[in-house]
Amino acid sequence: MDTAAKVDALMDGLRADLERLAAIPSVAFPGFPAEPVREAHDLLVGMLHDVGVERVERIDLPDTAPVIFGEIPPPSPDAPTVLLYSHYDVQPPGDEKLWLSPPFEPTPVEGGLRARGIADDKSNVIAHLGMLRAYEGRPPVGVKIVFEGQEEYGSPFDDYPPSDPERFACDAMVIADLGNLRPGTPTLTTGLRGASEVVVEVRTLQEPRHSGEFGGAAPDALLVLLNALSTLHDVHGDVAVAGLRREEWSGTTYTEDEFRALAGVRDGVPLIGSGSLGERLWSGPAITVIGLDAPSVEHAASAVVPYARAKLNLRFHPRQDAKEARGLLVDHLRALRPFGVPLTVTPGDTGPGYEASTGGPAYRAALTALREAWGEDASYVATGGSIPLVNGLARAAPDAEVLLFGAQDSMCNLHAPNERVLFSELRNTVVAMCAFVREYAAGFRPGAAS
């Protein structure tokens, strides 16, 4: 099969199906209607049947949208099985006034389409279907398909796969919920930082007191909290909590100009931290204050503040234990006594990071496939974001190689207004998936260690 030519012939149909899917507002957050999520589910079930997937099932778990599970048996007893993952739910659109076109009306942009969820993750759903279409439903490997319906909000499905390991047993899995560092640069993601949340709270007075009469001796809860928060970073902006793992980053990373543009850093404002961007973003910790309860400036009174609270988000090294990392932050805060005042520190949710092993037959096949699709060797990155299901799938199939690549790119505005996908990235991802299953099938040896 001339893979590139076959995929090129399929692109008009894949684009049309992507537009149909992206037009469905499948937001699985509380407060949004469930009907569009079910509509997207039903559309994809139909597409899977149309491409020749005879076994398509629905996994229903409490408090989550339905998960689509499909299976194509291996063409021979010694052929490997590949699990394909992506999700069909999307982020809420946010402030629609910030969009250049309605978020659920797929709109042409230069080289692609704009819509909410069109990159994250509906482009990757379509890329999986494109590979199956290129092989007319008979790829050279066994295939298991997992299309999740509530990834963006969080789902009990994250922890389900280890309870049903036979269903998810495979030799390799392609987690397509991310993509390239930049358009045109084939990229394998090899690590995911873990994430934890911690709330720190200060109560000092029964109620506000006049700042002229009491300020200077009455303990100001907001000053206490700000003093505590200031200890989390050193003078350079690097995390100062002892024990949080940080290592040099040896893979590819952004240029500073790219990162400043992506982050929207204002002119004249320096980046924080030291070391390479990869080290700051992927192989080292980050602590962000994501919420603060304190009097607003607009409604401020001349009074000593009796109560203040902050919510912290911690990102940590892919190989650091999640509870250990959260515990280090909690212990750091609990040991503080700003102006002699104790803090109330409450640990929140925590999720582990993930670091993929490299060098096995699936990994080698992926390197060949990405080179074939994009015409250059793949770059290696990590991501500060988390995909909790990866760990669940890895526990269900502990010997499977995990590959993370897809049709998104870092400049696609995922989770932001005016999200877009480029047809070049979608096309090359389909080519890469086709080449991957071909190369993996050819080089696979049953029972061989990866």
Image: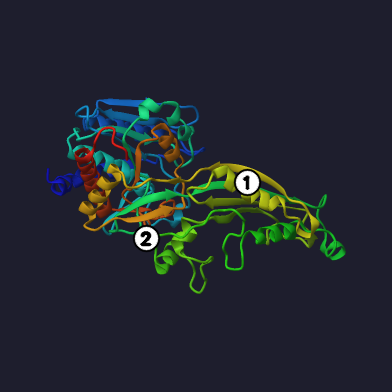
Decide if residue 75 is on the left or right side of residue 350: left
Q: In this view, does 251 lie to the left or right of 440?
A: right
Q: Check disc 2 and report its element: helix, strand or loop.
A: loop
Residues at marks 1 and 2, CA–CA distance in whole angstroms: 31 Å
Name the residue located 80 percent from the left edge and 57 percent from the top edge: 340
Q: Where is residue 365 in the image (x, y as percent from the top left)?
A: 25, 45
Q: What residue type is labelled 1?
A: Gly
Spot occupied by residue 246 in the image (x, y as percentages of width and height): 52, 57
Which amino acid type is shown beneath numbered disc 2?
Answer: Thr
| Quarter occupied by the N terminus | top left
Disc number at residue 252?
Answer: 2
Q: In this view, does 341 lie above or below 394?
A: below
Residue sitting at x 17%, y 37%: 135
Q: Position of residue 199 (x, y in %)?
A: 65, 48
**Viewer can see residue 23:** no
Residue at the extreme bottom of the image, as rendered: 268
Which label number is shown at residue 327? 1
Residue 433 found in image quarter: top left
Task: Specify which label sits upstream in the sequence, 1 or 2.
Answer: 2
- 333 up-or-down from 22: above or below: below
Residue at 44% x, 51% y: name it: 415
Which of the labelled discs sits on residue 24, or is there none?
none
